[in-house]
C-alpha cells in the first residue's frame, strides 16, 4: 500500500523529518520523491543534519530504494552531490521523464524580478522548467543525461509491480496547501499543485492503493516569501527564538522565515483536499517546556490546548484524521507515536 506525506501549511512543516521517521521505522520497499529542488527537506540523525533537495528523505533506511518520479525536477550536479553525501547511489532509481533543470532555466528565473521579488521564488529554476514543459519546448529529461543512465527505470511499472507483490511505498510530497498552484494563495504559490492526488500522478501511481495520507503541521506557520500570513509576528526578540531554536531559516533560500499564527482555515482545507487520515505535528517544542517529551501526559497545558483544539477541528472536517505523530525535537528519533 501507499502512504503519502503532504504539507498542511506553507511548506517547511517538517515533511522531511516525518518521512525519514516513517521510512526508518517502517518497512517501505520504496520511498518516492516528486517536485523540485526549491523544496529543502531536513533530516537529522544523531546530530548530523542533511538538507535534501533532490532525493527522498527515506534514505536513512538502507533497505528502502529511492525513487524520483516523472513529476520530479532535479539538477544533475546537485543530485550527484547529494548521492555522494548520503552514500545512496546504489539505491537510486529515476523515471526517464523526470526533468533536469538547465542552467538557462535557473538563470531565467533568477533574472526575472517578477519571480524573485514579487512571488519570492527560491530561484532554482523549477518554475521555468515546468513552464517549458507545459509549452512543450525541448526540456532535458533524465533519460537524455549520460551521467544518469545507470539509474533510469520505468518507475510506474516498478512501483505498481511492487504494490502487486504486497510491498509498501512512501510518497513524499513537497511544499504545502498554501503554496498549491490550484488550491493555494495565488499568485503567492509554487508552480505545481501540492496535494496528495497530484503527488500520486507525478509518481505514476493511482489512488486505489493509498492507505494513509499524513498531513504535517507546525503549531504556527512560516513563509519564506511574500503572501498571506495571519497574525504575523513582528517582535524582534520573539522572532529570534524561532530563527535560532526553531531553525526557521530557509533551507534552500537561506532567508529568515516569516512567522504567523496557526490558521484553522488552511488546516481544514489541507485535511479535506488531501483526504488526510493521519496528522503529524512538528515543532511542538517551540512551546516552552516540551523538548523531547516522551508521553502525551507530559506536554505542557499550552501544548495540550493546541493539540486538543486540533482534535476538535478534525472532528469537524472529513475524513476526520487522528493525530498520529508528534515531533518534540529536531532529531528523527525525537518523535512521539500516539
Ligand atoms: P517558487 O516555487 O520557487 O517559485 O517559489 C514560490 C513561493 O513558494 C515563494 O514564496 C517560495 O518562498 C515558496 N516556496 C517554494 N518552495 C518552498 C518550500 O519548499 N518551502 C517553503 N516555501 C517554498
Ligand atoms: Mg523546506
Image (cartoon, rainbow, N blue to C red):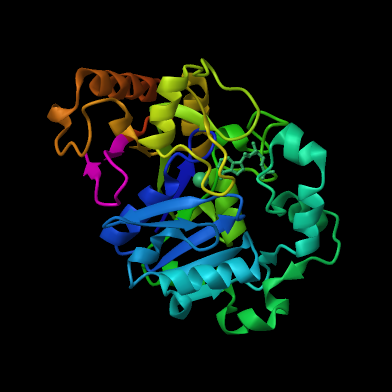
Residue found at x 53% / y 35%: 256
Report the span colored magenta.
323-338
Q: Percent position (x, y) of residue 50?
A: 42, 58
**132 or 229, which is in the foreground?**
229
On the question of residue 159 being in view, the answer is no
Residue found at x 25% / y 45%: 335
Q: Quadrant of the C terminus?
A: top left
Considering only vertical position in the picture, is 314 above or below 209? above
User: Is residue 229 found left or right of 311 in the rendered image?
Assistant: right
Q: Quadrant of the N terminus?
A: bottom left
Residue found at x 36% / y 48%: 18
Q: Percent position (x, y) of residue 327?
A: 29, 40
Q: Percent position (x, y) of residue 211?
A: 39, 50
User: Is residue 89 found left or right of 187 in the rendered image?
Assistant: left
Residue found at x 56% / y 79%: 151
Q: Percent position (x, y) of residue 323?
A: 30, 34
**30 or 49, which is in the foreground?**
49
Considering only vertical position in the picture, is 230 above or below 105? above
On the question of residue 47 being in view, the answer is yes
* Quadrant housing residue 129: bottom right
User: Is residue 296 found left or right of 70 in the rendered image?
Assistant: left
* Quadrant housing residue 144: bottom right
The magenta stretch spans residue 334: yes
Amino acid at each position: 500500500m501507499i502512504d503519502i506525506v503532504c504539507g498542511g501549511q506553507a511548506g517547511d512543516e517538517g515533511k522531511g523529518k516525518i518521512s525519514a521517521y516513517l521510512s526508518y521505522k517502517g518497512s517501505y520497499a520504496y520511498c518516492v520523491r516528486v517536485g523540485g529542488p526549491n523544496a529543502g527537506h531536513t533530516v537529522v540523525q544523531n546530530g548530523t543534519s542533511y538538507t535534501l533537495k533532490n532525493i527522498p528523505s527515506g534514505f536513512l533506511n538502507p533497505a528502502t530504494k529511492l525513487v524520483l518520479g516523472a513529476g520530479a525536477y532535479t539538477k544533475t550536479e546537485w543530485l550527484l552531490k547529494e548521492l555522494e553525501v548520503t552514500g545512496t547511489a546504489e539505491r537510486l532509481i529515476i523515471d526517464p521523464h523526470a526533468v533536469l533543470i538547465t542552467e538557462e532555466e535557473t538563470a531565467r528565473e533568477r533574472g526575472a524580478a517578477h519571480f524573485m521579488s514579487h512571488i519570492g521564488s527560491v530561484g532554482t529554476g523549477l518554475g521555468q522548467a515546468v513552464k517549458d514543459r507545459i509549452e512543450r519546448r525541448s526540456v532535458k529529461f533524465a533519460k537524455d543525461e549520460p551521467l544518469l543512465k545507470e539509474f533510469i527505470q520505468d518507475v510506474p511499472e516498478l512501483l505498481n509491480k511492487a504494490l502487486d507483490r504486497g510491498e509498501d511505498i512512501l510518497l513524499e510530497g513537497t511544499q504545502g496547501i498554501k503554496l498549491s498552484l490550484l488550491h493555494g494563495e495565488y499568485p503567492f504559490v509554487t508552480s505545481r499543485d501540492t496535494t496528495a492526488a497530484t503527488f500520486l500522478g507525478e509518481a505514476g501511481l493511482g489512488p486505489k492503493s493509498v492507505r494513509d495520507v499524513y498531513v504535517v503541521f507546525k503549531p504556527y506557520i512560516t513563509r519564506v516569501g511574500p503572501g498571506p500570513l495571519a497574525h504575523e509576528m513582528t517582535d524582534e526578540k520573539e522572532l529570534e527564538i524561532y530563527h535560532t531554536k526553531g531553525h526557521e531559516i530557509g533551507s534552500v533560500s537561506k532567508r529568515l522565515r516569516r512567522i504567523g499564527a496557526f490558521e484553522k482555515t488552511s488546516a481544514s482545507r489541507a485535511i479535506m483536499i488531501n483526504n488526510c487520515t493521519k496528522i503529524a505535528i512538528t515543532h511542538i517544542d517551540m512551546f516552552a517546556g516540551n523538548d523531547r517529551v516522551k508521553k502525551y501526559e507530559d506536554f505542557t497545558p499550552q501544548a495540550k490546548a493546541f493539540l486538543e483544539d486540533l482534535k476538535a477541528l478534525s472532528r469537524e472536517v472529513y475524513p476526520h484524521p487522528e493525530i498520529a505523530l508528534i515531533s518534540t525535537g529536531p532529531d528523527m528519533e525525537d518523535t512521539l507515536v500516539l
